[in-house]
Image (spheres, helix red, strand yellow):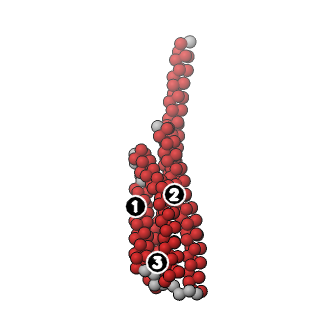
C-alpha cells in the first residue's frame, strides 16, 4: 500500500516538474514577445523622427535661400537658421538616444530611464515650440509685409505661409503625440516585464 502511495507521489512530482518547465518556457516566450514588441515600437519612433530630421535638413538651406531671394533681413534669416539648426540638433540627439536603447539584453531600468527622458523632452517641447513658432510666424509676416512689394506675390506668399504654418503645426503636433504615446506604451510594457520578474 505504501509502495502505491510512493509511486503516486513520484508521479505527481514528475508532473509538477514538467509543468514547471512548461511555465518557465512560457515566461521566456512571453518575455521575448514583449521585448520584440518594444523593439518594433522603437523602430516606428525612429522612423518618424528620421522623417523629421530629413525635413529639417531640407528646410534649412531652402528657407535660407528663399528668404534671401525674397529680400528678407539678414537678422531674420540668421534667426531662422539658428532656430532650425537647434531644433534639428535636438531631434538628432533624441533619435540617437532612441537607437541606443537595448531591449534585448539591456537593463530595463536604464532603458526606461532613458526612454522617459525622451518622452519628457517631447512632452515638454510643445511648451517651447508653440511660442517660438508664433513669434517666428509674426516676424515672418512682418518681413513679408515690409520687404515685399504689395501685390499678388505678397498676398500669395503670406497666404501660403499661413497655410503652411497651420498644416505644419498640425503635422508636428501629431508627430509629437505619436512619440509620446509610443514611449508610454513601451514604458508600460517595461513595467509589465518588471512585475513578472
Q: Quarter-wise, where is residue 164 in the image?
A: bottom right
Q: How many marks?
A: 3
Residue at figure coordinates x 51%, y 22% from the top left: 10
Q: Secondary structure at mark 1?
A: helix
Which residue occupies the foreground of this view, 104 or 192?
192
Residue 116, x across and y down, in percent? 45, 50
Left or right, 72 with reference to 172: left
Label annotation for residue 17: none
Circle 1 residues within 10 Å: few <14, some 14–19, many ≥20: few
Residue 15, x across and y down, in percent? 54, 29
Which residue occupies the foreground of this view, 133 or 21?
133
Q: Earlier in the sequence, mark 1 or mark 3?
A: 3
Q: CA distance from mark 1 to mark 3?
A: 22 Å
Q: Earlier in the sequence, mark 1 or mark 2?
A: 1
Residue at figure coordinates x 40%, y 61% from the top left: 93
Q: Secondary structure at mark 2?
A: helix
Q: Which residue is mark 3?
A: 63
Residue 108, x across and y down, in percent? 43, 45
Circle 3 residues within 10 Å: few <14, some 14–19, many ≥20: some
Figure check: 183 above or below 4: below
Q: CA distance from mark 1 to mark 2?
A: 14 Å
Figure check: 180 above or below 146: above
Q: CA distance from mark 3 to mark 2?
A: 26 Å
Q: Nearer the viewer, mark 1 or mark 3?
A: 3
Figure check: 72 above or below 119: below
Q: Which residue is mark 1?
A: 93
Residue at figure coordinates x 51%, y 72% from the top left: 138
Label annotation for residue 179: 2
Residue 44, x across and y down, in percent? 52, 59
- Look at the image and tell me whether residue 114 can be seen: yes
Amino acid at each position: 500500500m505504501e509502495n502505491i502511495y510512493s509511486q503516486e507521489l513520484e508521479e505527481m512530482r514528475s508532473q509538477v516538474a514538467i509543468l514547471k518547465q512548461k511555465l518557465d518556457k512560457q515566461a521566456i516566450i512571453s518575455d521575448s514577445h514583449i521585448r520584440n514588441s518594444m523593439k518594433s515600437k522603437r523602430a516606428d519612433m525612429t522612423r518618424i523622427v528620421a522623417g523629421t530630421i530629413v525635413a529639417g535638413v531640407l528646410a534649412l538651406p531652402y528657407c535660407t535661400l528663399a528668404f534671401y531671394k525674397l529680400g528678407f533681413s539678414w537678422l531674420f534669416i540668421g534667426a531662422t537658421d539658428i532656430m532650425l539648426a537647434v531644433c534639428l540638433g535636438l531631434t538628432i540627439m533624441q533619435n540617437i538616444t532612441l537607437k541606443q536603447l537595448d531591449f534585448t539584453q539591456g537593463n530595463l531600468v536604464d532603458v526606461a530611464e532613458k526612454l522617459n527622458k525622451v518622452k519628457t523632452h517631447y512632452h515638454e517641447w510643445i511648451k517651447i515650440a508653440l511660442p517660438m513658432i508664433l513669434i517666428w510666424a509674426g516676424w515672418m509676416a512682418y518681413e513679408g509685409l515690409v520687404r515685399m512689394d504689395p501685390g499678388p506675390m505678397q498676398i500669395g506668399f503670406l497666404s501660403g505661409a499661413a497655410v503652411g504654418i497651420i498644416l505644419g503645426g498640425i503635422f508636428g503636433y501629431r508627430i509629437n503625440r505619436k512619440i509620446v504615446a509610443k514611449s508610454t506604451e513601451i514604458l508600460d510594457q517595461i513595467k509589465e516585464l518588471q512585475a513578472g520578474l
